[in-house]
C-alpha cells in the first residue's frame, strides 16, 4: 500500500478556509492523504461559521484549532496548498523544496452561515481534485 502523503493547507488566520480544507481533505482522501493546516498569523479560535458548516456537512470538528506555521515546519510535507493570496505571498521557505499550488477561496469570515457553506462546497469541488492531481492519488 502506498504511503500516506502529507498536505499542508496554508492560510493567514487558520480559522476558516484552511480548517475546512483540512477536514474535507482528510475525509475525502483518507488513507492516501493526511491534511494539516496552519496560518501565517493564526487567529485565537476557529470561526464558528466554519465549525457549523462542517457539522452541517456531516464532518467532524473535534480538535480543530488554529496553528502557527512554525508548529508544522518540521513535518514531512509533500504538498503545500495556499488558499488565500496573503498566505501565498507570506509562504515560508521550507527546509527542502516542496511542491506548492495556490487555490484562493473567498473569505467568509464575518459573513452569514450561508457564505461558509458556499466556501465549504467550493473547497470540496476544487481542492480535492487539485490535490489528487498534484499528488497522483
Image (spheres, rainbow, N blue to C red):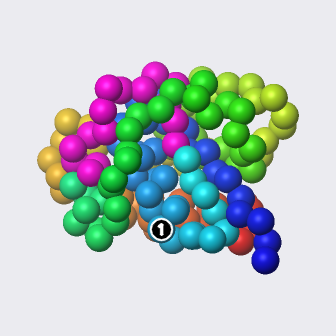
The residue shown at (75%, 50%) is 78
Residue lying furthest front: 63
| Quarter where residue 106 is shown | top left
Is residue 107 at least partly visible in the picture?
A: no
Can I make out residue 93 in this image? yes
Q: Nearer the viewer, residue 122 or 42?
A: 42
**Where is the N terminus found, in terms of image quarters?**
bottom right
Identify the residue at image location x=45%, y=62%. 24
Whole-percent x, y for residue 114 in the image: 19, 56
Would residue 135 appear left or right of 124 to someone viewing this image?
A: right
The residue at the point 64 percent across, 63 percent down is 33
Does 57 sit left or right of 8 as displayed?
left
Residue that sits furthest to the right in the current view:
96
- Where is mark 1, residue-wise? 27
Q: In which quarter of the image is the C terminus?
A: bottom right
Q: Where is residue 82 in the image (x, y as percent from the top left)?
A: 57, 41
Asked if the stretch drawn in magenta spans residue 112, the answer is no
Look at 15% across and 47% down and name the residue there: 112
Residue 85 position (above or below residue 16): above
- Report how many numbered discs are placed on residues in the image: 1
- Give, as a single range, the part of the protein colored magenta: 37-51
Disc 1 crowd, CA 10 A, few/some/many (<14, 14-19, 20+): some
Percent x, y for residue 100? 71, 44
**Rendering quarter of residue 2:** bottom right
Q: Is mark 1 on a helix, strand or loop?
A: helix
Q: In this view, does 76 lie to the left or right of 41?
A: right
Residue 44 is a magenta residue: yes
Nearer to us in this view, 29 or 87: 29
Amino acid at each position: 500500500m502506498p504511503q500516506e502523503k502529507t498536505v499542508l493547507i496554508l492560510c493567514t488566520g487558520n480559522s476558516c478556509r484552511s480548517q475546512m480544507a483540512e477536514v474535507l481533505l482528510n475525509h475525502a482522501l483518507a488513507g492516501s492523504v493526511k491534511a494539516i493546516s496552519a496560518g501565517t498569523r493564526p487567529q485565537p479560535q476557529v470561526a464558528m461559521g466554519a465549525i457549523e458548516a462542517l457539522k452541517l456537512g456531516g464532518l467532524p470538528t473535534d480538535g480543530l484549532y488554529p496553528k502557527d506555521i512554525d508548529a508544522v515546519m518540521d513535518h514531512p510535507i509533500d504538498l503545500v496548498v495556499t488558499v488565500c493570496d496573503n498566505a501565498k505571498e507570506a509562504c515560508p521557505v521550507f527546509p527542502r523544496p516542496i511542491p506548492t499550488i495556490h487555490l484562493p477561496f473567498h473569505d467568509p469570515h464575518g459573513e452569514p452561515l450561508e457564505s461558509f457553506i458556499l466556501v465549504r462546497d467550493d473547497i470540496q469541488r476544487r481542492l480535492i481534485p487539485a490535490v489528487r492531481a498534484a499528488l497522483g492519488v
